[in-house]
Image: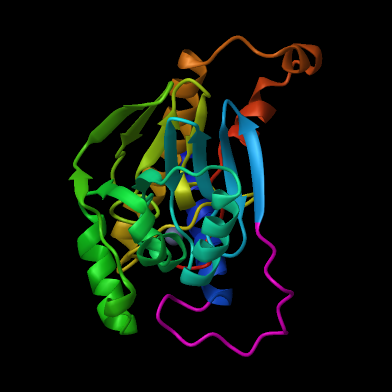
Amino acid sequence: MQNRREFILRSSLAVAAGALGSTPLFGQQAPAAAPQPPTVPVFTPIRRNVGTFTARGGTMGWLVTPDAVLVIDSQFADTAQMFLDGLKTRTPRKIDLLLNTHHHPDHTGGNKVLRPMVTKIVSHENVPGLQKKQAAAAKTEDAQAYADETFKDGWKVDIGKEKVSAKYYGPGHTSGDAVFLFQQANIVHMGDLMSHQRHPRVGEIADRQLAEQHLIGARQVHVVVVVETCEGEEPPSRGQQRNGNRGADHEHSITGHGSRRV
Ligand SMILES: [Zn+2]
């Protein structure tokens, strides 16, 4: 008889296997799809000058103040340009820091477009190598811009009135996922470690054992991040006190967006 942990793991693997079965693996040709609606760039403020940008690809995060501009991820080249166009209407300031949550092209594909406006790009130490390998396979080496600074276990910076930290929890969605925390705003950006209403996709599934390690890693990140964020959070707002649903607030604070790649 399988215990609860085995049941959860088997269930998760079944979900992952099902998802893989219906989704082309990274690098494969996607089947012909219905015409896509036009891409609409949207800036969404959350709180304390931190918000999200959505267009196409992984949800970007931003901090925009008169004395600091920080951006998380860059989507694709065309949508990164949409982001820049919108950013220029919000601040005359350049981007002090661009942080990459991981190497996938819907998160780093716009790095080169943003590069002239960026002082420094930061990522986990595994990201540049994975990004180069991915670019070589896709023959997109000329379209890349890589991190200037990398970290192994963690990283932090004081920027304007905000403190931003990064943490590496081990293999999860990829082998180089960073979880970024805006400490004052109490907002976490998890990249593709968080998917909306579905299990996060795990990467580099060369064999079952590795897949299990990534699944366990991705789940641990969820638990650890939510607990850590709860411990460091500000008192709930009046709205939260009224509905008493602090868990829902964390759902809104976790800004990662699902990717269809592995
Ligand atoms: Zn991804």
Residue 222's place in the image compared with 77, above or below, is above
Judge left or right: residue 222 versus residue 31. Answer: left
Residue 250 in picture, x, y percent from top left: 60, 29
Q: Residue at 63% across / 90% down in the picture?
A: 32
Residue 184 in picture, x, y percent from top left: 48, 20
Q: Is residue 35 magenta?
A: yes
Q: Residue at 42% across / 29% down in the picture?
A: 224
Residue 241 placement: quadrant = top right
Judge left or right: residue 204 versus residue 228. Answer: left
Q: Nearer the viewer, residue 177 or 215?
A: 177
Question: Visible in this render: residue 39?
Answer: yes
Q: Nearer the viewer, residue 223 or 162?
A: 162
Q: Residue furthest right?
A: 242
Q: Which residues are magenta?
A: 24-41
Q: Is residue 197 magenta?
A: no
Residue 47 in picture, x, y percent from top left: 62, 28
- Secondary structure of the magenta portion, mostly? loop
Question: Visible in this render: residue 1?
Answer: no
Q: How many marks?
A: 0
Colouring convention used in this rendered image of the protein: rainbow
Q: Nearer the viewer, residue 173 or 107?
A: 107
Q: Residue at 64% across / 37% down in the picture?
A: 45
Residue 15 in picture, x, y percent from top left: 56, 59
Q: Residue at 41% across / 65% down in the picture?
A: 113
Residue 252's place in the image compared with 138, above or below, is above
Q: Nearer the viewer, residue 66 or 137?
A: 66
The quadrant where ligand 1 appears is: bottom left
Q: Quadrant of the C terminus?
A: bottom left
